Image: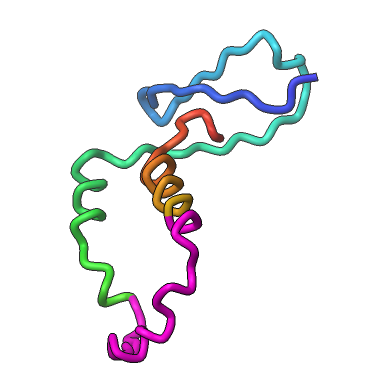
Amino acid sequence: MINSIRQQAIVGKGGHIEILSPELPMGARVEIIVLIEASPLETTHNLLRPKTSQLPLRQGVSGSKLLAFAGCIEPFELQKMSQAIENNCAKVDLNEW
């Protein structure tokens, strides 16, 4: 039995949305969740809006206090971290959901 269907649609006049799928059994109760895509202008505005005003102020530490930790992570571990960041950060899987 099918558990979910993902489709994209265009909202018609009066908010009308049509979902056509032969896998849907007649008379079955379904839950519908509508996700409205943000316009490119909204996305750009959100990306450019400063996030710093939303973050609590934190006290930093001087670099000299951090020197005690220098060399604590093995070079091969640093390389693995760098590779993971390079391979996976900022990538979006459009089929994830």
Which residues are drawn in magenta?
A: 55-78
x and y percentages locating residue 68 in the rendered image: 41, 86
Please say which color scheme the image uses. Answer: rainbow
Does the magenta portion include 77? yes
Up/down of 74 relative to 90, above or below:
below
Most foreground residue, 11 or 46: 46
Name the quadrant containing residue 5.
top right
Most foreground residue, 10 or 50: 50
User: Residue drawn at (43%, 52%), measured in percent from left and top?
Assistant: 79
Name the quadrant containing residue 54.
bottom left
x and y percentages locating residue 13 in the rendered image: 36, 24
x and y percentages locating residue 6 in the rendered image: 56, 25
Q: In which quadrant will I find the C terminus?
A: top right
> Image check: 3 left or right of 51?
right
Total numbered labels: 0
Most foreground residue, 52 or 41: 52
> Image check: 50 left or right of 29?
left
Up/down of 86 relative to 69, above or below:
above
User: Residue drawn at (43%, 42%), measured in percent from left and top?
Assistant: 88
Q: In which quadrant will I find the N terminus?
A: top right
Q: List the single residue furthest toward the right.
A: 1
User: Residue drawn at (26%, 74%), measured in percent from left and top?
Assistant: 52
Does the magenta portion include 87? no
Q: List the single residue furthest toward the top.
A: 22
User: Residue drawn at (46%, 33%), measured in percent from left and top?
Assistant: 93
